[in-house]
């Protein structure tokens, strides 16, 4: 059962302007890897050169920040929604 | 606190009618000192409403000049203000709207050297700047000076708002520990912004400020409000204080103010 992934506006050029896509996986890490397979370009935008999630992008599972769950190893269940919320600076 | 004049009672009558405001609340608003960082897309609607509400002292920090491309959203400035300093143009517009309001202009960029002196005299700070180095500087300075900060950002059709009260909730670094390196995240200048999005988000910032002045309602503390104009959808995610926060966590690594542009320039 694929997870729903909410794509933020700054990254929607990677998903043909879709704000909500599906990706499969049992953990956040797997879903993000599947997202990269389906829509190449996510990995370099979400991860830094050391392979860690960038510190100005947050990943939420059902509105809980994964940094306060089990990070990328946070398990996903049917119907879970993953949201990517980057910092935005425009004013 | 001084009594309201007859003219003030008429001007603010729709506030005074609200039990949550009343004459006492309106006097609090007139006594309040609020600093706007930026008189652009966010600072303009926020400043207009705060001036209309009668916030007694409003500081405006902006070093830019009014450009034609600003006028699609920056409603403090008019066509006749082109090429004039935004801080001065903002002052004139707000003073014309409400003579009760005293506007103090800071025609300068905030840096680690000057920010503490600027924010010192204010009760509440509103971040309407347009770049990450200023946003992190403002967050860090407000945490150190124990000033409530209403933070917001906008991008294309999206907006984000959160209110950061030192000691009560998370700071901006609890949410996003470090700014992106230069060039990785496009600015409004490069990516565009639907003008009205700035209005929606800037007025939410003004709402947060007024609630804090009045001590009423539930501020956006520990809650990031996001807005998308195309879907016309507001969402909210909880934001916790991060014990590992580099600024307000248990073992802070950010112990002095950082000028990120210089830092990045040195590394490049």
Image (cartoon, helix red, strand yellow):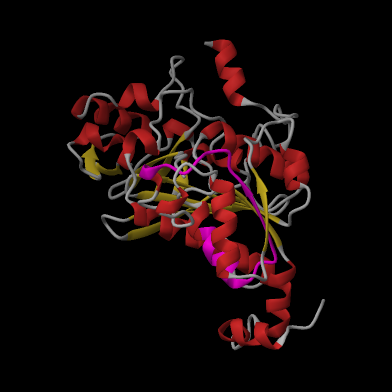
* Res. B207 in view: no
Q: Nearer the viewer, residue B157 or A76?
A: B157
Please tell me in which quadrant of the rendered image residue B242 appears. top right
> Does the magenta run of residues contain A59?
no
As drawn, A47 above or below B204: above
Q: Position of residue B109 (x, y in %)?
A: 62, 35
Compared with residue B240, is residue B123 higher up or lower down, i.e. above or below? below
**For the image shown, how many numbered marks are present on the structure?**
0
The residue at 70%/44% (across/down) is B142
In reply to whether residue B58 is colored magenta, the answer given is yes
Q: Judge whether B10 appears above or below A47 on screen.
A: below
Q: Is any atom of residue B261 visible in this view?
A: yes
In the visual, does B15 lie left or right of B236? Answer: right
Q: Quadrant of residue B190?
A: top left
Residue ID at (59%, 50%) = B88
Quadrant location of the N terminus of chain B in the rendered image: bottom right
Q: State the residue in front, A30 or B128.
A: B128
Residue at the limit of the structure toward the front, as seen here: B80
Q: Position of residue B34 (x, y in %)?
A: 67, 57
| Residue B124 drawn at (x, y percent) | 68, 56
Give the residue at x 55% y 41%: B175
> Which residue appears at 32% of the width and 47% of the height?
A81
Expressed as whole percent of the image width and height from the top left, the position of residue B85 reads 55, 43
The region drawn magenta spans B46-69
> B135 or B11, which is in the foreground?
B11
Name, please, the residue furthest toward the right: B1
The answer to whether B237 appears left or right of B213 in the picture is left
């Amino acid at each position: 059962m694929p997870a729903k992934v909410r794509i933020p506006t700054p990254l929607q050029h990677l998903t043909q302007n879709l704000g909500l896509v599906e990706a499969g996986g049992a953990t956040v890490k797997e879903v993000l890897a599947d997202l990269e397979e389906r829509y190449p370009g996510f990995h370099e935008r979400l991860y830094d050169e050391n392979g860690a999630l960038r510190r100005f992008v947050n990943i939420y599972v059902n509105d809980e920040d994964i940094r306060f769950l089990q990070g990328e190893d946070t398990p996903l269940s049917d119907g879970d929604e993953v949201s990517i919320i980057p910092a935005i600076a425009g004013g | 606190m001084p009594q309201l004049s007859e003219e003030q009672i008429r001007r603010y009558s729709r506030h005074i009618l609200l039990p949550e405001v009343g004459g006492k609340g309106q006097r609090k608003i007139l006594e309040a000192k609020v600093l706007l960082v930026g008189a652009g897309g966010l600072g303009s609607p926020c400043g207009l409403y705060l001036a209309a509400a009668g916030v007694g002292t409003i500081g405006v920090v902006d070093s830019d000049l009014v450009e034609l491309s600003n006028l699609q959203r920056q409603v403090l400035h008019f066509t006749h203000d082109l090429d004039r300093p935004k801080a001065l143009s903002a002052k004139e517009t707000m003073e014309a709207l409400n003579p009760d309001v005293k506007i103090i202009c800071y025609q300068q960029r905030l840096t680690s050297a000057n920010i503490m002196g600027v924010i010192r005299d204010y009760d509440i700070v509103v971040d309407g700047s347009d770049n990450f180095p200023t946003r992190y500087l403002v967050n860090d300075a407000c945490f150190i000076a124990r000033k409530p900060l209403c933070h917001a950002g906008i991008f294309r059709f999206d907006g984000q708002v959160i209110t950061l009260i030192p000691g009560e909730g998370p700071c901006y670094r609890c949410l996003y520990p470090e700014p992106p390196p230069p060039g990785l995240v496009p600015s409004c200048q490069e990516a565009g912004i639907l003008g009205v999005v700035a209005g929606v988000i800037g007025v939410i910032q003004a709402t947060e400020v007024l609630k804090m002045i009045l001590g009423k309602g539930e501020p956006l503390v520990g809650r990031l409000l996001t807005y998308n104009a195309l879907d016309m959808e507001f969402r909210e995610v909880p934001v916790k204080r991060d014990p590992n926060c580099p600024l307000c966590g248990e073992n802070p690594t950010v112990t002095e103010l950082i000028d990120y542009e210089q830092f990045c320039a040195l590394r490049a």
